[in-house]
Amino acid sequence: MDYSIAEISKITGLSAYTLRYYENIGLLSDIERDENGYRRYADKDILWIDFLIRLRNTGMPIGQMQKFAQLRRQGNSTAGARRALLETHQDHVLNEIKELEQHAAVIREKIVYYKQLEEES
Amino acid sequence: MDYSIAEISKITGLSAYTLRYYENIGLLSDIERDENGYRRYADKDILWIDFLIRLRNTGMPIGQMQKFAQLRRQGNSTAGARRALLETHQDHVLNEIKELEQHAAVIREKIVYYKQLEEES
DNA sequence: ATGATCTTTATAGCTGACTCTAAGGTACGG
DNA sequence: CCGTACCTTAGAGTCAGCTATAAAGATCAT
């Protein structure tokens, strides 16, 4: 199975613009082309794009994603480096979750404070 | 006690540029001036700046912070509106925490996968 | 009283991450 | 063979959120 850029856009939620952009900056590579030069995406590309989206959604900057994509292109021998990169990122994510929880607690206090203000007025 | 912009920058971690910028866009208001026109920040300003930082760190866009700051300037009668705004934001934050946890779980699986790859190679 | 080190304003520039435009090629229904 | 609906590229534009520059005034140590 392969897909046009419009189909992949629908499937992944990334715009066609963004898909081309990601390819330009090296996040996507080896995307097949049909006889007219149109991109044809494969199922494995969808998996990879979904993973990129996951990294993005956890706040990984594009520079690091590029590093990761580059290691991936270099084959299995870079598995260690890729794991290390992911573990560092994982630490960031877990840390961010903790911080968000603390912030959320303070915001909750503030909400309680406003409720009191409303009752008094 | 009052503080120069350089001191407040150190205390809050925001650059002097950012402090002036926040004042320009209405996030900070009624900052005192000394006889030379230099800004003099009060302790209440520090509390407010810290709260702004908290909102920022939980991903609140500046536009919403402006809305919040505007309500605050209008006095106690807006407590309800401010509480509502915070509650909506709180929902976003809690949701984001949930999503981050899910993403973190998938990244963990990926890390395990790379560990296997390394052992096989 | 001079140089270094603050501060002020207005305005320009930067970074990250897209998002769109222009100019053109391809496909396909009527 | 015309319209329109895709697709291509290179490059320009946008947006949020700062960050820096320029020109000038104030403070302070030597």
Image (cartoon, coloured by chain):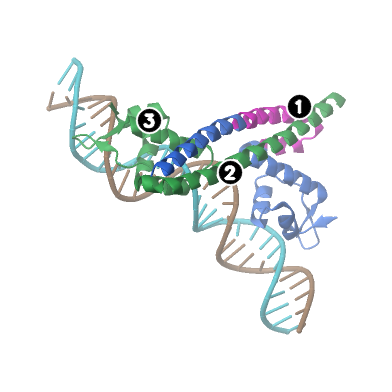
Chain colours: A green, B blue, C cyan, D brown
- Of all residues, the one furthest to the right in this rendering is A120
Kind of residue at badge 3: Ser
Mark 3–mark 1 distance (CA, rounded to whole Å): 41 Å
Q: Is residue D26 above or below residue B40?
A: below
Q: Is residue B22 above or below residue B110?
A: below
Residue at position x 53%, y 44% in the image: A87
Can see residue A26?
A: no
In this rendering, which labeled residue sits more in front, label 1 or label 2? 2
Q: Which of the chains bears the disc numbered 1?
A: B
Q: Quadrant of residue B33?
A: bottom right
Kind of residue at badge 2: Asp
Q: Which residue is mark 1?
A: B80
Residue at position x 71%, y 27% in the image: B84
Quadrant placement of the C terminus of chain B: top left
**In this picture, which residue range is highlighted in magenta?**
B67-96
Earlier in the chain: of badge 2 and badge 3, it is: 3
Q: Are marks 1 and 2 on the same chain?
A: no
Residue at position x 60%, y 29% in the image: B98
Number of numbered discs overlaid on the protein picture: 3
Q: Which of the chains bears the disc numbered 3?
A: A
Q: At numbered mark 2, what does the secondary structure look like: helix, strand or loop?
A: helix
Q: Which residue is mark 2?
A: A91
Rendered location of residue A35, percent (x, y): 18, 35
Q: Residues within 10 Å of mark 2 (few under 14, many from 20)?
A: few
Q: Are marks 3 and 1 on the same chain?
A: no
Q: Which residue is mark 3?
A: A9
